[in-house]
Amino acid sequence: MTDLEAALRRAVRGEVGFDVTSRALTTMDASNYRRVPLGVVAPRDADDVAAVLEVCREHGVPVVARGGGTSIAGQATGTGVVLDFTRHMNRLLALDPEARTAVVQPGLVLDRLQDAAAPHGLRFGPDPSTHSRCTLGGMIGNNSCGSHSVAWGTTADSVRELSVLTARGRRLRLGPEWAGAPEGLRDLVDGDLARLRTGFPDLPRRISGYALDALLAEKGADVARSFCGSEGTLGVLTEAVVRLVESPRARALAVLGYADEAGAAEAAAGLLPLGPLTVEGMAVDLVPSTEGLPRGGAWLFVETGGDTEAEARARAEAVVRAADVVDALVVTDPAGQRTLWRIREDASGTATRMPDGREAWPGWEDCAVPPARLGGYLRDFRRLLTAHDLRGTPYGHFGDGCIHVRIDFDLLTEAGVARFRRFSQELADVVVAHGGSLSGEHGDGQARAELLPRMYGAETVALFERAKAVWDPDDLLNPGMLVRPAPLDANLRFAVLPREPVDVEFGYPSDGGDFSAAVRRCVGVAKCRTTSVSGPAVMCPSFRATGDEAHSTRGRARLLHEMLAGELVTDGWRSPEVRDALDLCLSCKGCRSDCPVEVDMATYKAEFLHHHYEGRRRPAAHYTMGWLPVWLRWAARARMAPVVNALASVRPLAAVAKRLGGIAGEREVPRLAGETFSGWWRGRGGPAEGGDLVVLWPDTFTEHLSPSVGRAAVRVLEAAGLRVVLPPTLRGRAVVGDGTSRSAAPLLSSLTARRSRVCCGLTYVSTGQLDRARAVLRRTLDLMAPVLETSAPVVVLEPSCAAALRTDLPELLHDDPRAARLASRVLTFAEALERHAPDWTPPAVNRPVAGQTHCHQHAVLGDAADRRLRESAGLTGELSGGCCGLAGNFGFEAGHYEVSAACAEDQLLPAVREAPGGAVVLADGFSCRTQLEQLAGVRGRHLAEVLAEGLE
């Protein structure tokens, strides 16, 4: 233990982390930069913060305050001690509806404040797209804005008082009329009044530099306002009194279509006199699909408010009439508005990939110019991109003249980094020529501070340095930011990654087969760190259960990044830190769809586990549950189901078996079916006559644990006029159609051939046994060869198995063209009925439903066909999102029970408890049904079972 660590542990009541994991999680924010800290402290209160500052001052170690870690410019990273306010100092201390104020701690997430203010008809004005995970402290440090700034201004406009600790331990209460000003600040201002009155651009989004002009007498000498945007370089915030604004009772969203980006930009300023709440812009090259948007090549999202829906709509329609548009759409339905806003909010992530898959990066993320000059600035910006052979997709706050953009810089080679520097310098000059600010929202950090002399001139920058010295004479707080900055091309986070591709098992088709590129996908926007989700969203259940960054998608990606770097995590694939962080990943695949950049942590986990345990003994659960298909087939062949069930009911025997098998003691062992699904199938005498041929996949769970689902599916599919068969069980079959295994080979070969079963390999993939998974999947492809020669679809009832066949199969066997062919044939139960029996009318069940959309269905398969099928059957209501928490083997593994149960309590169990009387509890996944039964005593049913019952 170092002297610094020991001193901090003696002085601080909060957690002190100098371990590899704690440091690795804070090496980066959402920027291009990386710094390795000495340690991380989670203070419990202001006294802890004061103690940290005292210890670090004695040791000459810098201190960096960190909120949600979503900063774009690198200001939330440092080489000293990082203060993590999200763990303890994250509370709303008071809310006064009459005064319209709130008292908050720096680690409070913005959405939690909005949730508390909403019942009073109030809200905090600024709302960055990261509102579900950014913190008030970070917003004050960066002077954040968001989409509603045309109505409610920046964070500085919403701050009344700030409680701050200086680096030397002084406790200040900052406010107007010089309240809390440190000694020497007023003299500094009085000595340079002319510069402060003339040297700062007058525009709504001037975030760059220190806001020293807020200290002018005519502006109220507001020390709190001046402190906003100082990026943790002047003092450490411990508490804030913030203003709230009245939230409109109703809102409407006018989406205005323009021919191109320049047209939208030039129109934006003209809409401001109409008093909109937002004027946001984006172009077609940022939108994955234009479905639901009006015609055009670019759009303005203009929100209006009112006391009633009619009033809000009338204002939106007035905006449409005033705008010269190609097409327009006015939406008053809240769900419809959320869908449209999600397109805009996800842009910070989706913009990190060009349409051809090329990576794009921040760095010039948020320059701002006067709104009336935005069109001209964008044209110059596009010309500069072309001159440097770069591409980017501008979007953002057109009404404030603030543009976000990710650019496809090559930050991996010396030549690319040199071009990054040249472009940055030239763009800074373009911004200044248009009367703009280098930063219009996210602060300067390391990305832009070096270029501040181009915007302000050397003398004003020298004034910034003198102001920093007044507040922090020892340069202890976030050194290298804003004043005396590090070069904008130093400390790039990509510099430490290997230059040659890493030898891996999966194909990573979206990343050119490069695992490093896959890990680089995580840019740190931290959508995985949301503490609550709404609608169908899933990501990230383990973070919501634990609140620990290490168990978020971003946290795991950071550890994998450091593993590849080899500087902090030094033992590569054998790293226990990475293993432990991945241990609580449920492999729900929620990040594959909910992460704006489609980080696929389930695949990364399987990859890591394969290498981590290669040539080594695995945990017992990998052998018991990873090889579950083998054990269940053996039990079925030996007709041992009754014996196994009887033994499992003897608690002492079951306890010993679970302990030896690495299974959680709290879990009940599911009962094996007395008759397998395929056994039932053989007994019924083959397929019925019908129309289109469909191959019903007998997954392990349906085959051995819930054959009633398979029987129900057969009944419904046949009632819909389809001809159902099962896959072959012998290789080399010449025909498909009766579900048996008649071979075209000679009789002897047929008699001596060994029967086998298709398998999606799910349990082997989820436990990282990729060699075994590959062997199982190749055998499956051999068996399915005759099916692939037909046009028959493959209907898979278990969503996890369907997802494995759609994604894991072609990505693991990327060298076998049959894998992609089989993946393309996979349909869910609802998809099969919709595509192959479009004229069939399901039975009228006419009941409400409750339950949860399977996480793999949400992330990989989609549930649109299921929704339509439920609607046709009169099954009303919405299913919740999230993950059930059992997640295949995850919830059964020893040590996972508490997290598994917490995930179920996140959405699934509350949805079931709140279900109306007579509701059908739908759960297509075996894990979901098991979790419901074991935690709530509720029987969930597959949609096929519900429809089959309706047929009766």
Image (cartoon, rainbow, N blue to C red):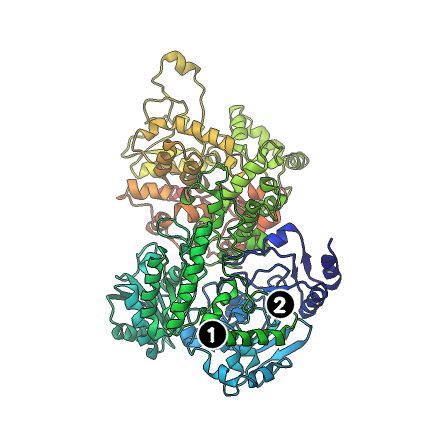
Task: Say above or below: 773 vs 520.
Answer: above
- Where is the C terminus found, in terms of image quarters? top left
Q: What element carries label 2?
A: loop
Residue wearing tag 1: 456
- 399 or 249, nearer to the observer: 399
Residue kind at label 1, given as amino acid type: Tyr
Residue 406 in view:
yes
Residue 57 percent across, percent down from the top left: 70, 67
Q: For the view shown, which residue lies furthest in the top direction?
A: 748
Residue at the image point whose x is 50% and y is 82% from the top: 196
Tell me: 583 left or right of 500.
Answer: right
Count the labels in the image: 2
Q: Splitting the image into 4 quarters, where does residue 466 fall?
A: bottom right
Do labels 1 and 2 touch, CB within 8 Å?
no
Q: Is mark 1 on a helix, strand or loop?
A: helix
Residue wearing tag 2: 477
Q: Splitting the image into 4 quarters, where does residue 364 fall?
A: bottom left
Task: Say above or below: 213 vs 434.
Answer: below
- 892 or 372, nearer to the observer: 372
How packed mark 2 is, by other alpha carbons closer than 10 Å (few <14, some 14-19, many 20 or more), is: many
